[in-house]
Image (cartoon, rainbow, N blue to C red):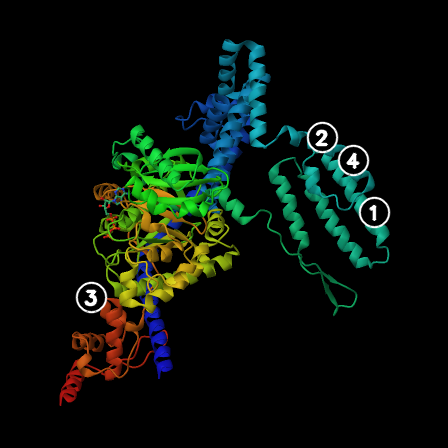
């Protein structure tokens, strides 16, 4: 029975999904028909423009040729554009003569051909829909060529005004006036060199290589190397040389093929001859330009096509297998070249990171050292130890924001455990709370006694955010937790932790700690890079973050608030995160990478196709403010997904931060503890609690108000947590919230839990209050779909799904039918009325 119900709920889910997709495609279709008309007009006009460009470019080239051949004759008539009866020689009439005269004589000389070429080039590019970037490149280089060639002709061949045009002449006059003739020569040569270097991407090493290649080329020609292909020839500098050498090679190749394959049939040698003759014909057009080299490559491709040879036996056809085409250039590389790397922040490219001024400066500026206090404490420590016959060789104090560390080196022969046992006695003599003895301090060879300062100073969030250590941190998810005992900013990477457990008695600074974590991430990460899932059973602690919902928060598709305060919704969110985790793992598997960092890197380099479901993956940080409360109300239902996420989510960028007041073993269970190596302990009330959270004592000796111990599996570090007050968080979230945001919060995958599953034996008394209305909607529309109910009755997904199940149980709609909507078993409203009346009897 259970199985049947499960299968049914699954099938039902599918139907709802299909329904949605159908709806989407329908919407799309109706939009398409309205848009179709517009797009066809657009396409036609685009096509007309491209044709116009090609035709006008070709016409311009023809008129230039005609102008150059009939030349000077038309110069005067060109002035007579208004005179209809005037005779002109230009093939394109008066307009052709006028344009040619303007471009060639008054303009750029024969370099004006570049203009005609430019028109044709742009037309062809636009026709094939080649990226605007490449068209811009062509325009730039053609205009630059025009100017340079015009200037060169204007200077070196200034006897004929048609070569350089007025522009070439004027440019040179200008330079000659200011630089003299020799200066102008150098300048022009310099420009020509710069042009050659950038246009043809020549480099000194490239030129050297080409020079070196020349002797090899000759050797190959002499040997008649059949592998020597025409593309190599195209790079040689002298075109006439190329043509003759290519012909030589062809002869060589034909000769060798004849001698090698003398046994071949006549028909075959005929084919060879055909191919070689077409090859030679091709080489006639060969000039050392890029266009020609690609033409040759194209010919070669053509030669690769299957060649079917008919032998004497007409039934026997020999077909050579076609070679596979190879991609000349890596697709991803060409995409990156054309569009640049993918930028995840592009959608909110104007997003301004919050400035440090939003945070309050608590005016402490640093630590105030109280010499008297230091001296007194030192004497007390030395004296107390002396009372127990422990002599000290050396003592040193390091003043931190809340505690001072006294490092002592005992005389030789003193047992360390002896000092450790004196913890309470030292505390008594210093009459201070929270004395902690670290014996020995790992790696220092000393014993540490931490004594709280009389006047602790507040570590402001502002000071830690502004610290170079945080600002320059090269971490994925840097968190500035506070300052260590030696007053150094303490920055950790949440991505490395990979999950964080926070515990401490009430009022000891957990909420401030969570705010410090979130603030750090807000200062360092763009909204596209990190998303928060906030669970706040206390309902008041994290509400301020509501303002940044559409920037930084993630939520379930059907939930209204992004911040989850209702424990029953947490279960759905956690399960949804598990689905997101599974989805991300399959994306990673598909991309053949091991973690989110590599995946995003690959995605940025456009190596992953968004059409295959790939997308930029932001980090997801799940924050639970009161975990004990969750465990109390939901128990295993919460523990299982949390444990799953904790075990597996590290590689795919989901990190958990869990805070709890009660670090007892039934809250922080073994399975959770095992997966949370990074832990923060604020002050706790008992040694047992300290042991639960830190696997050792120490947390019970803290002094509270943000004094904490941090461990990542090995050493304990005492840190004073940075303090960030509610008004500061409010300012910060207001600043971010006032900026342009995404249309919605980041949507997690849909999850329908137990409550959404169907139960066919639904009791009439348990029917939804909208059951009757829903039945009417369904019968009127004759379509049994949950999304219809959602729309018409403005219901949430789960409730609509439940009503559909009840309708099925009542026999109003049929069972789930895959992609189709469920059939409606009652034909009209009258029959429905009848149905209800019968049911009531
Ligand atoms: N890092 C800190 N520096 C200075 N004072 C602090 C710091 N952290 C906390 N405090 C003080 O302690 C008070 C209580 O802190 P907080 O609200 O974070 O405790 P909590 O552990 O979240 O308590 P609860 O579990 O009852 O919510 C704060 O109002 C503040 O005055």
Q: Which residue carries the number 4 mark?
A: 218
Q: Position of residue 395 (x, y in %)?
A: 42, 33
**Pointer 4 and pointer 2: residues touching (CB < 8 Å)?**
no
Q: Nearer the viewer, mark 1 or mark 2?
A: 2
Cα separation between marks 1 and 2: 29 Å
- Closer to the N terminus: mark 3 or mark 4? 4
- Label 3, label 4: how far apart the Cα atoms are: 83 Å
Give the x, y percent position of residue 278: 71, 47
Q: Nearer the viewer, residue 592 or 294?
A: 592
- Whether 309 is drawn above or below 173: the answer is below
Residue that label 1 marks = 255
Give the spatial CA distance, label 1 vs label 4. Answer: 18 Å
Quadrant of the frame with the C terminus: bottom left
Which residue is at the far bottom? 841
Location of residue 596 in the rendering, given as x and y in whole percent from the top left corner: 46, 52
Position of residue 168 measured from the top left corner of the image (x, y, whole percent):
51, 19
Which of the two residues, 324 or 455, is positioned nearer the viewer here?
Answer: 455
Q: Earlier in the sequence, mark 1 or mark 3?
A: 1
Which quarter of the figure is the N terminus placed in? bottom left
Q: Nearer the viewer, mark 3 or mark 4?
A: 3
Of tags 4 and 2, which is closer to the observer?
2
Residue drawn at (46%, 28%) of the image: 99
Labelled pair 3, 4 in contact (Cβ < 8 Å): no
Secondary structure type for disc 3: loop
First in sequence, mark 4 or 2: give its number.
Answer: 2
Where does label 3 land, which residue? 794
**Image point (25%, 31%), residue name:** 363
Q: Which mark is residue 211?
A: 2
Q: Is 768 left, or right, of 97 in this rendering?
A: left
Badge 4 marks a residue whose secondary structure is: helix
Q: How many neighbours does mark 4 have within 10 angstroms: few (below 14), some (14-19), or many (20 or more)?
A: few
């Amino acid at each position: 029975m259970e199985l049947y119900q499960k299968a049914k709920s699954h099938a039902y889910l599918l139907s709802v999904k299909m329904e949605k997709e159908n709806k989407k495609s329908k919407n799309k279709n109706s939009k398409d028909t309205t848009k179709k008309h517009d797009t066809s007009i657009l396409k036609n006009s685009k096509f007309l423009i491209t044709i116009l460009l090609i035709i006008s470019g070709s016409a311009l080239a023809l008129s230039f040729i005609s102008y150059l051949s009939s030349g000077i004759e038309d110069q005067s008539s060109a002035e007579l554009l208004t005179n209809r009866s005037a005779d002109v020689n230009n093939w394109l009439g008066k307009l052709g003569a006028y344009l040619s005269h303007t471009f060639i004589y008054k303009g750029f000389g024969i370099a004006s051909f570049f203009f005609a070429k430019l028109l044709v080039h742009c037309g062809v590019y636009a026709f094939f829909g080649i990226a605007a970037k490449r068209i811009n490149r062509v325009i730039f280089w053609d205009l630059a060529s025009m100017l340079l060639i015009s200037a060169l002709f204007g200077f070196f061949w200034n006897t004929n005004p048609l070569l350089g045009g007025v522009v070439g002449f004027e440019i040179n006059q200008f330079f000659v006036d200011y630089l003299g003739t020799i200066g102008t020569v150098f300048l022009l040569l310099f420009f020509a060199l710069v042009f050659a270097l950038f246009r043809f991407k020549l480099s000194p090493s490239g030129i050297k290589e080409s020079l070196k290649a020349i002797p090899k080329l000759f050797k190959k020609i002499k040997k008649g190397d059949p592998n020597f292909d025409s593309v190599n020839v195209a790079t040689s500098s002298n075109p006439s040389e190329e043509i003759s050498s290519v012909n030589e090679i062809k002869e060589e190749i034909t000769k060798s093929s004849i001698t090698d394959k003398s046994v071949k049939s006549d028909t075959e040698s005929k084919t060879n001859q055909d191919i070689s003759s077409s090859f030679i014909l091709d080489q006639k057009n060969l000039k050392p330009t890029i266009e020609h080299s690609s033409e040759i490559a194209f010919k070669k491709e053509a030669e690769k096509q299957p060649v079917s040879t008919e032998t004497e036996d007409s039934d026997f056809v020999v077909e050579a297998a076609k070679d596979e085409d190879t991609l000349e250039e890596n697709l991803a590389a060409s995409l990156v070249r054309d569009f640049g790397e993918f930028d995840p922040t592009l959608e909110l490219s104007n997003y301004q990171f919050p400035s440090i001024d939003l945070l309050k400066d608590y005016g402490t500026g640093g630590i105030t050292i109280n010499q008297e206090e230091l001296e007194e404490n030192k004497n007390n420590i030395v004296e107390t130890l002396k009372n127990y016959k422990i002599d000290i060789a050396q003592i040193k104090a390091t003043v931190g924001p809340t505690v001072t560390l006294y490092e002592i080196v005992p005389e030789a022969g003193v047992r360390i455990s002896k000092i450790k046992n004196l913890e309470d006695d030292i505390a008594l003599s210093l009459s201070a709370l929270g004395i902690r003895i670290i014996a020995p301090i790992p790696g220092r060879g000393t014993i540490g006694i931490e004594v709280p300062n009389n006047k602790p100073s507040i570590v402001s969030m502002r000071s830690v955010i502004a610290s170079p250590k945080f600002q320059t941190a090269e971490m994925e998810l840097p968190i500035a937790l506070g300052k260590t005992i030696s007053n150094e900013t303490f920055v950790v990477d949440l991505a490395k932790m990979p999950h964080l457990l926070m515990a401490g008695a009430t009022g000891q600074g957990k909420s401030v700690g969570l705010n410090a974590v979130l603030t750090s991430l807000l200062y360092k990460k763009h909204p596209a890079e990190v998303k928060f899932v906030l669970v706040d059973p206390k309902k008041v602690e994290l509400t301020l973050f509501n303002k940044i919902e559409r920037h930084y928060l993630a939520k379930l598709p059907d939930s209204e608030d992004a911040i989850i305060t209702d424990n029953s919704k947490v279960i759905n969110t956690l399960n949804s995160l598990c689905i997101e985790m599974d989805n991300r793992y399959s994306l990673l598997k598909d991309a053949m990478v091991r973690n989110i960092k590599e995946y995003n890197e690959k995605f940025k380099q456009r190596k992953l196709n968004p059409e295959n479901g790939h997308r930029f993956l932001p980090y997801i940080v799940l924050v639970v403010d009161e975990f004990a409360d969750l465990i109390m109300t939901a128990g295993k239902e919460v523990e299982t997904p949390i444990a799953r996420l904790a075990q597996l989510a590290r590689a795919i960028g989901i990190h958990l931060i869990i805070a709890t007041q009660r670090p007892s073993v039934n809250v922080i269970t073994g399975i959770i503890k095992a997966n949370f190596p990074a832990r923060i302990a604020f002050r706790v009330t008992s040694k047992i609690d300290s042991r639960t959270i830190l696997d050792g004592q120490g947390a019970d000796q803290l002094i509270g108000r943000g004094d904490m111990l941090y461990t990542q599996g090995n050493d304990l570090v005492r840190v004073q947590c940075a303090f960030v007050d509610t008004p500061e968080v409010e300012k910060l979230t207001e600043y971010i919230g006032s900026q342009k945001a995404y249309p919605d919060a980041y949507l997690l995958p849909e999850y329908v839990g137990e409550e959404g599953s169907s139960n066919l034996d639904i009791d009439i008394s348990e029917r939804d209050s909208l059951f009757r209305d829903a039945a009417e909607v369904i019968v009127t529309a004759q379509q049994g779909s949950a999304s219809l109910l959602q729309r018409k009755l403005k219901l949430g997904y789960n409730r609509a799904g439940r009503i559909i199940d009840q309708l099925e149980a009542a026999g109003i709609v049929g069972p789930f039918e895959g992609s189709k909507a469920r059939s409606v078993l009652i034909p009209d409203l009258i029959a429905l009325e009848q149905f209800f009346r019968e049911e009531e009897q």
